[in-house]
Image (cartoon, grey):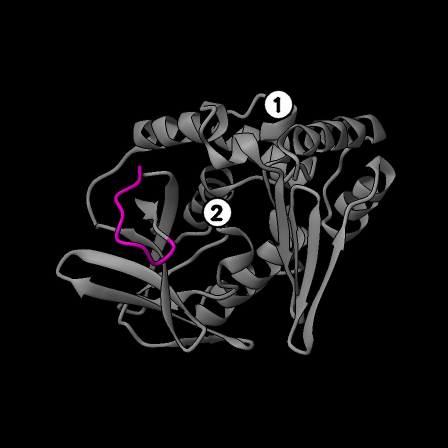
Amino acid sequence: RYLEILDLTGRNHDLGFLSELNRRHVATFAFSSVGVRLGDDLPLDFASLFDRIVTRRRGGYCFEQNGLMFEILEELGFAPEMYLARVIYNQDTHPGLTHRVTLVELEGQKYLLEVGFGSMGPRVPVSMTGQETQDGTRVFRVKEPQPGEWHLQVFKDGDFFSLYRFELARYGQADCEVGHFYSHKSPRASFVNHLVVSRILAREIRSLRDLDYRVMKEEGDREQTVGDAAHLHRILVDDLNIRVSENESERLFRDLASRDAETGA
């Protein structure tokens, strides 16, 4: 059913297939903290992830999106490996393990396949060899700046920018549950405090953060401020492919607007 939705049935399971799987997933199933902001129950078992992301189109973030992709890759006959990463945004910091990463080996070479990092993530598998990977107008690579420490990097403002770092250590589902619990329950977690939704399309990236909506294209960005609940609803449903009710959009807008009013934003 998943492959039918992405129009990828009857394909050889080669690098071209993995690339199209990556592209079509991030274009179809939005990266989203909508469920977190609305207080949805967010279990990580495969049936729940499939129902939430594929069937009900509620979106999800890394533990959800990359968790779903891991299970699908296994079912397709690949042997994916799961690791946890620290989101650093090019800083020498040591945050918690709040990002889930998937590696896939194909014809003797390993690739990072990322469908859960939002608007800054790649649309195609990135080689673990350090080789640069072209993704439209963007360039990614996985670099090992010091032994045993791997960074996913994007070329940004004239140099490579580290999005997150990870080690090839042993992790399991229990580790994901811990990171997931923090990410959607802690009052200090980004997804608890911010509405974040994005889709990465072939020629543009659509990104919503709270009440700021941006469409990024090669010829330039277009930005707008969400004016009311109806405007937010149209963006979520029509532009970002998230299924929410008008009442849910009203709740989301009211919470964000009242918070901005309190902080003077």
Decide which of 254, 185 is in the foreground and name it.
254
First to last magenta residue range: 89-96
Decide which of 121, 212 is in the foreground and name it.
212
* Mark 2, residue position: 69
* Mark 1, residue position: 40
SS class, disc 2: helix
Decide which of 171, 11 is in the foreground and name it.
171
**In which quadrant of the rendered view does residue 232 lie?**
top right
**Which residue appears farthest toward the right when viewing the image?**
230
Q: Is residue 30 left or right of residue 128?
A: right
**Which residue appears farthest toward the left when viewing the image?**
147
Q: Is residue 227 left or right of residue 212?
A: right
Image coordinates of residue 238 in percent, x first then y, are 81, 49
Residue 138 drawn in magenta: no
Q: Residue drawn at (70%, 31%), measured in percent from left and top?
A: 261
Q: In this orientation, does residue 12 appear?
A: no
Separation of marks 2 and 1 at Cα, in angstroms: 21 Å
Image coordinates of residue 107 in percent, x first then y, are 31, 69
Say what amino acid the circle numbered 2 marks: Met
